[in-house]
Image (cartoon, helix red, strand yellow):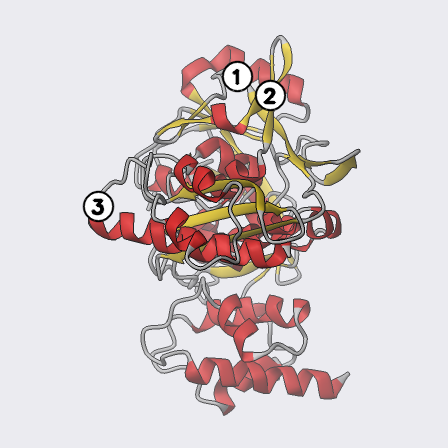
Amino acid sequence: MYPASFEYHSPTTVKDALGLMGKLGDDAKLLAGGHSLIPMMKLRLAQPKHLIDLRNVPGLKGVKEDGGTIVIGAMTTWYELETNAIVKAKCPIVSETASIVGDPAVRNLGTIGGGLAHADPAADMPATAIACNFEMVCEGPKGRRTVKVDEWFQGLMSTALKEDEILVEVRVPALAKGTGAAYLKFPHPASRFAIVGVAAVISTDGKGTCSKASIGVTGAGTKAVRAKGVEAGLSGKNLAGAGAIEAAAQKGAEGVDVQADLQGSVEYKAHLCRVFAKRAVEAAAKRAG
Amino acid sequence: MKLPVKMTINGQSVSHEVEPRFLLVHYIRETVGLTGTHVGCDTSQCGACTITLNGQAVKSCTLFTVQADGANIMTIEGLAKDGELHPIQQGFWEKHGLQCGFCTPGMIMLAVQMLERYPKPSEEVIRHQLEGNLCRCTGYHNIVKAIEWAADKMAAAK
């Protein structure tokens, strides 16, 4: 398959990349790992006239710590997140989620920034981003701004990132003590995309009572969303109690604009939301202790 | 507008001018003439086009040639040394890890990376690592055995 023709640009600083974006406007697309954009270009669902490749821009890759926050460069690949010692120690759910994105070859090139900016409705990390309260740092001609995850995903493949901005950094709060987290999905057997995926971050008071629950759902609708019904259903409940998690998980599809597609009907995908909400919360609660 | 690219493929330096939209798999097959790398699904799922790029397994149908400028690439043709099969190739032979053979180059190139990262992989690890390489003949059973065979062989040679 041959994508439509385009001009290729390979800037070496964020400033040069922003300059090119300002000059080329709507005709340009940013290229990170390319594992969402290139397949779309091959199918001619996307036909940008210019591609601005970020691979030669230094400083956009890597993981560091800033107090209780893990700072992840936008061009950091899924494989790097899967294996990074800081991420594994401070917020292992992010490593675990990265380790089941696509397949090993996809994870070698695909990036967290590309993935979160593309906002595929069936991508894995958006669920974990919501559950873990990621913050996205965007750089534009006027400088940097930070966007909280609850404002990030706006619709089908649409985010709060403005057309003249680059997502440069993702900030992830380290998991607090007494907090457990898990992401579980029902994957499509060939693409490994999530037909439904649920991420849960659960804090307990040490005696099994849930002090805080944060739940993200991906795959079922046009965008990843927070499962507020499940969160409310868990808060203050003793999770060891019979049926407590089960009851809360029944709200797993509330607030999700479940879409029927080749993978399943609305009813089927809503059911998966409830099933995976239960499994993810159970796994997270077990880790919270 | 064509752009110059230069890279190393199986130890040989190659340079050409290519259109930016020219995919790496087509460059390898049609320009360089190494047809062991296959085009399967062409939608980044099947892994028949897997090569290693700077030591990492990648799907060459999902990269533009210009993105590989300066890279060190290995394809299936670069594995055997002096007419002797690489242990992974030998494993596929010994354990009957193929039938039609279409997916085999990609399977083997992915396995090269796998055994570098996980020298003694469990069956579970092998199957998880092979998730991006589809085979429609074998049911994967003998592919798993072939990789286990190669892992033992390579560990013994160390």
- Which one is nearer the viewer's eye here, B48 or A173? A173
Total marks in image: 3
Q: Secondary structure at mark 3?
A: helix
Measured Cα–Cα span from mark 1 to mark 2: 6 Å
Measured Cα–Cα span from mark 3 to mark 2: 42 Å
Measuring from the top left, give residue A129's x and y in whole percent.
54, 38
Label 2 marks a residue whose chain is A
Mark 2 burial class by Cα count in 10 Å: few <14, some 14-19, many 20+: many
Q: Secondary structure at mark 1?
A: helix
What residue would you read off at disc 3?
A: A266
Q: Outermost residue, bottom direction?
A: B94
The image quadrant of residue A254 is: top left
Residue ID at (62%, 25%): A11
Three-letter amino acid code of the residue under disc 3:
Val
Measuring from the top left, give residue A57's x and y in whole percent.
67, 30
Q: Are marks 1 and 2 in contact (CB under 8 Å)?
A: yes
Q: Are marks 3 and 1 on the same chain?
A: yes
Residue ID at (62%, 47%): A204
What residue would you read off at disc 1?
A: A21
Work out whether residue A34 can be spotted: no
Of badges 3 and 2, nearer the viewer stands 3
Measuring from the top left, give residue B98's x and y in whole percent.
40, 81
Three-letter amino acid code of the residue under disc 2:
Ala
Q: Are marks 1 and 2 on the same chain?
A: yes
Q: Secondary structure at mark 2?
A: helix
Name the quadrant of the C terminus of chain A.
bottom right
- Relative vertical location of residue B85 with respect to residue A23 in this rendering, above or below: below
What residue would you read off at disc 2?
A: A17
Quick one: label 3 or label 1, which is nearer the N terminus?
A: 1
Residue ID at (71%, 84%): B155
- Relative vertical location of residue B71 with respect to residue A60 in this rendering, above or below: below
